């Protein structure tokens, strides 16, 4: 059965909202309970994020493909697997959904709904980390979806979980989430000035992943 565009866009918005709410909300609770221990807070944040990614992708992939990420949608559009106008609708839904998720998280913890982050994540190493994290995520999606599509939810969840711990930026790897976190002055936040570098690096990482994927697994034989 063909899923209409409005339902696909709604699925992207809903998934993005829940994902953002979990990332930010778990960060708030983790930082409160960890009592200043950032390692414990990050571990809790990691577990919650990985868990919800697995659930959301499993649940919503049959409807929209479960991108929840403008960098992913951009690459899928470049590969002509989604029409440009549909991709634009997806990206707008993802950004709006993530921003709404931040507001929901703030409301659940009785914080001001509208915030601007002051969490300093400046420096070339941070932006590089975002490029690397997004490269790893998009490459995992592209290769695993062709090798074993049913394993994509686990692959994405595990790639992000690992990224929280092996990158200096803790692996945002998603422009829509980055925008939402720029407007959350919490454990998961990032200053708007730093977010711009993150987003640029994320798209560069996604493009590199697309190129590497095409080289490793070309759609046509080179023989």
Image (cartoon, helix red, strand yellow):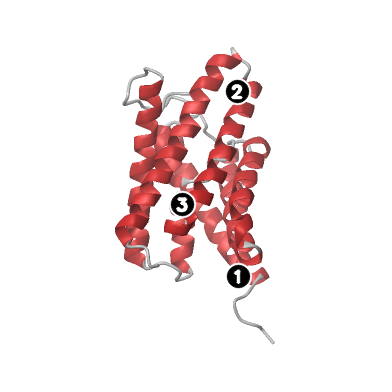
Residue 26's spot in the image, x, y percent?
Answer: 51, 27
Extreme-front residue of the structure: 1
Which quarter of the figure is the C terminus placed in?
Answer: bottom right
Q: Nearer the viewer, residue 87 or 54?
A: 54
Question: Which of the two discs, 1 and 2, labels the residue nearer the N terminus?
Answer: 2
Q: Which mark is residue 87?
A: none
Residue ID at (45%, 41%): 177
Identify the image quadrant of residue 222.
bottom right
Question: Which of the two discs, 3 and 1, labels the residue nearer the N terminus?
Answer: 3
Q: Are marks 3 and 1 in contact (CB under 8 Å)?
A: no
Image position of 111 with respect to 18: above or below: above
Q: Nearer the viewer, residue 180 or 127?
A: 180
Q: Nearer the viewer, residue 87 or 194?
A: 87
- Quote the CA–CA distance across marks 2 and 3: 28 Å
Q: Taking the image as drawn, is residue 89 in sight?
A: yes
Question: Which of the two discs, 2 and 3, labels the residue nearer the N terminus?
Answer: 2
Q: Which mark is residue 214?
A: 1
Residue ID at (60%, 43%): 160
Identify the image quadrant of residue 84.
bottom left
Residue beneath disc 3: 60
Residue beneath disc 2: 41
Residue 22's spot in the image, x, y percent?
Answer: 48, 33
Which structural element holds mark 3? helix
Left or right relative to 124: residue 223:
right
Image position of 13 with respect to 74: above or below: above
Tell me the crowding category of disc 3: few under 14, some 14 to 19, or many 20 or more residues within 10 angstroms, Cα based. Answer: some
Question: Mark 3, mark 1: which one is toward the viewer?
Answer: 3
């Amino acid at each position: 059965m063909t899923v209409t565009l409005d339902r696909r866009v709604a699925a992207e918005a809903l998934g993005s909202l829940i994902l953002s709410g979990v990332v930010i909300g778990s960060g708030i609770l983790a930082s409160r309970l960890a009592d200043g221990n950032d390692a414990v807070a990050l571990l809790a944040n990691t577990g919650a994020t990985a868990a919800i990614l697995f659930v959301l992708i499993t649940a919503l992939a049959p409807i929209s493909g479960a991108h929840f990420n403008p960098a992913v949608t951009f690459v899928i559009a470049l590969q002509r697997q989604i029409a440009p106008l549909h991709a634009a609708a997806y990206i707008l839904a993802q950004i709006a959904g993530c921003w709404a998720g931040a507001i929901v998280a703030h409301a659940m913890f009785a914080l001001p709904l509208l915030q601007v982050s002051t969490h300093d994540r400046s420096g070339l190493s941070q932006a590089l980390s975002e490029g690397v994290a997004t490269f790893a995520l998009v490459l995992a999606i592209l290769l695993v979806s062709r090798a074993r599509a049913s394993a994509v939810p686990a692959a994405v969840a595990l790639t992000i979980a690992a990224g929280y711990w092996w990158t200096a930026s803790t692996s945002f790897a998603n422009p829509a989430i980055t925008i939402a976190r720029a407007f959350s002055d919490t454990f998961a936040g990032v200053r708007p000035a730093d977010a711009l570098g993150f987003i640029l690096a994320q798209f560069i990482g996604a493009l590199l992943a697309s190129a590497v994927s095409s080289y490793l697994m070309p759609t046509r034989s080179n023989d």
